[in-house]
Image: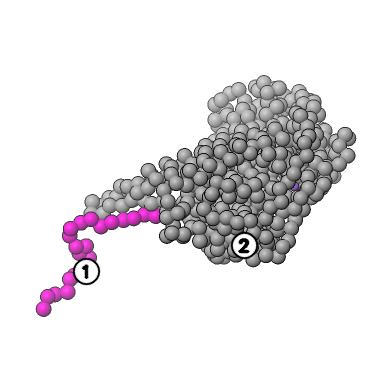
């Protein structure tokens, strides 16, 4: 593997690389080697002030004509230029992503295609927005006519996690810019490198200064002041339920809207009529892809009791065969989890499950061949009860827990036995059964005969404590638009509610 140099960057504020006011930095750690491979700037509330000011200025510059009130077609040109640069720099970005967060290089490369695709998609929607302006309202009185304007919400704060460092940011950056908002992106301190490169791309394509600002830094020092800032009009967040709740609390004080995409403990239901090998592979992909660190991971397997023995036997064999290695090794399918903290957290889940009486069928330990790095062998855990932590709590690591069921009703009941409601999967050759289960699952996303494939065109988001609001698709654009009704009185007659004063 050729040596990868991580560029040294500063905060990106008002179109300029800007040293943090307090000159703080944070180390960049490669989770595969535990080495420090560079430093990112660490913003604090002083930098948040500057970024909010820059974003506000960009929103209102030239009375908004340069950005917020420009036609969608103008903004689309920038989005397409960014997409082209991402594609041009794809392999460099994928390398940086993999070295920073530990995901297999093949996955990182795939993510970069999705990043470019997301900018392209929202460029189309930005263009489409112009035609949708002034959509007429059908009113019950012919003395009135009305229409609807869709306007950018304003300055938005985008706070993102480390599992898809660039893609989760772009799910927010692309539609917010398409809508005409200006944005301040605060990526996760555990993996910020590619978001700083996105800033560089915006600089290269000449995005108007302040339209996108990137503040790296800690959640408490940079994220919290952004969430509570009175001049930030909306916060859009992906991450843990605890942090989402704290962001919502501070936003509530200012009646600031939020969209939250939070944790999950999603079920995958496997009926007894499936092709077993095919279902085994989707079950693995559902939980072990992205090193198990996806909010939508289908990490609770419900398998029909009639096929459970054969299914689990195959699942364990396939799982033991997963190639665990440095993300840059050819064919790697599982890299390290993102950080030491996450590594310890995952191992604690395993030991708690054991202590609570569950059985670890395989994995859940450091692979023998990897002495360094935050590697955990993918684990499968059976003999689980519904009160156990491993059944109830999001792990965000490659751990799958298993229960069996005998009837469809029982499967649905177990699937919905969660405080979360992000996703769910159902695997069966009986498509009517899949339909019934899809309707019955308490979740924002349902996969039928697969798990995890995610398309930019389809809405993404959850119910219950997995949050609310939808990203992606046309819903993703609506997230950043405010709806204004304009109602006009068109009668020649006076309104006639009050008596005119009598003429003297
Ligand atoms: N569902 C999901 O997509 C994710 C879930 N998680 C879960 O959360 C656990 C902890 O991981 P973290 O990285 O600490 O997640 P987190 O939810 O705390 O971090 C996500 C983002 O929020 C920021 N943040 C943290 N505290 C903040 C605050 N008070 N105000 C504003 N922004 C704040 C972070 O800097 C980061 O950019 C993981 O073990 C995992 O279980 C983590 C990341 C994503
Ligand atoms: N396939 C993308 C899933 C991203 C997420 O964890 O929200
Ligand atoms: Na890192």
Q: Nearer the viewer, residue 340 or 92?
A: 92
Q: Is residue 497 magenta?
A: yes
Locate residue 133 relative to residue 167 in the image: left or right.
left
Locate residue 374 relative to residue 410 in the image: left or right.
right
Q: Position of residue 256 (x, y in %)?
A: 53, 60
Q: At 42% across and 60% down in the image, what residue appears?
A: 63
Quadrant of the image for the N terminus? top right
Locate residue 266 relative to residue 131 in the image: left or right.
right
Q: At 46% across and 59% down in the image, what residue appears?
A: 61
Image quadrant in which you'd find residue 217: bottom right
Q: Nearer the viewer, residue 457 or 33?
A: 33
Q: Which mark is residue 48?
A: 2
Dominant secondary structure, magenta: loop
Q: Is residue 10 above or below residue 360?
A: below
Image quadrant in which you'd find residue 103: top right
Q: Which residue is mark 1?
A: 498
Quadrant of the image for the C terminus? bottom left
Magenta stretch? 484-504
Q: At 88% across and 35% down in the image, what residue appears?
A: 368
Q: Would you say residue 416 is visible in this rendering?
A: no
Q: How is the image coloured?
A: one colour
Mark 2, Cα crowd under 10 Å, few <14 / some 14-19 / many 20+, is: many
């Amino acid at each position: 593997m050729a040596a990868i140099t991580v560029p040294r960057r500063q905060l990106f504020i008002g179109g300029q690389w800007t040293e943090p006011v307090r000159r703080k930095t944070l180390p960049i750690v490669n989770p595969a080697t535990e080495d420090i491979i560079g430093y990112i700037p660490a913003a604090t509330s002083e930098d948040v002030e500057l970024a909010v000011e820059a974003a506000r200025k960009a929103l209102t510059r030239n009375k908004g004509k340069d950005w917020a009130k420009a036609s969608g077609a103008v903004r689309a040109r920038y989005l397409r230029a960014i997409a082209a640069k991402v594609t041009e720099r794809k392999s460099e970005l994928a390398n940086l992503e993999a070295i920073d967060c530990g995901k297999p290089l093949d996955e990182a490369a795939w993510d970069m295609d999705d990043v470019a695709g997301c900018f392209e998609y929202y460029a189309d929607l930005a263009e489409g927005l112009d035609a949708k302006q002034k959509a007429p309202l059908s009113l019950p009185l012919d003395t009135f006519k009305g229409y609807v304007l869709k306007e950018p919400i304003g300055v938005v704060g985008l706070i993102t996690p480390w599992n898809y460092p660039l893609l989760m940011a772009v799910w927010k950056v692309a539609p917010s810019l398409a809508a005409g908002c200006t944005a301040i992106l605060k990526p996760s301190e555990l993996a910020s490198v590619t978001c700083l490169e996105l800033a560089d791309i915006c600089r290269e394509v000449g995005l108007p200064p302040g339209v996108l600002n990137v503040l790296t830094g800690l959640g408490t020092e940079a994220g919290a002041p952004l969430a509570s800032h009175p001049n930030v009009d909306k916060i859009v967040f992906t991450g843990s339920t605890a942090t989402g709740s704290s962001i919502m609390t501070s936003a509530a004080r200012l009646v600031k809207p939020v969209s939250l995409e939070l944790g999950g403990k999603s079920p995958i239901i496997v009926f007894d009529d499936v092709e077993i090998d095919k279902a085994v592979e989707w079950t693995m992909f559902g939980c072990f892809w992205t090193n198990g660190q996806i909010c939508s991971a289908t990490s609770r397997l419900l398998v029909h009791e009639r096929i459970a023995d054969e299914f689990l036997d195959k699942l364990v064999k396939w799982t033991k065969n997963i190639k665990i290695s440095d993300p840059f090794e050819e064919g790697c399918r599982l890299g390290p989890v993102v950080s030491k903290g996450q590594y310890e957290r995952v191992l604690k889940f395993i030991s708690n499950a054991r202590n609570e009486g569950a059985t670890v069928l395989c994995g859940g330990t450091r692979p023998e061949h990897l002495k360094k790095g935050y590697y955990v062998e993918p684990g499968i855990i059976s003999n689980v009860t519904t009160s156990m932590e491993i059944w109830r709590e999001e792990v965000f690591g490659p751990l799958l827990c298993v229960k069996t069921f005998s009837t469809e009703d029982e499967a649905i009941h177990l699937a919905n036995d969660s405080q979360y409601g992000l996703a769910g999967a159902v695997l069966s050759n009986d498509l009517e059964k899949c339909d019934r289960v899809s309707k019955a699952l308490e979740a924002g996303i349902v996969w039928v005969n697969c798990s995890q494939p995610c398309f930019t065109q389809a809405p993404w988001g959850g119910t219950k404590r997995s949050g609310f609001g939808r990203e992606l698709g046309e819903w993703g654009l609506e997230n950043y638009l405010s709806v204004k009704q304009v109602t006009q009185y068109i009668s020649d007659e006076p309104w006639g509610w009050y008596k005119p004063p009598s003429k003297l």
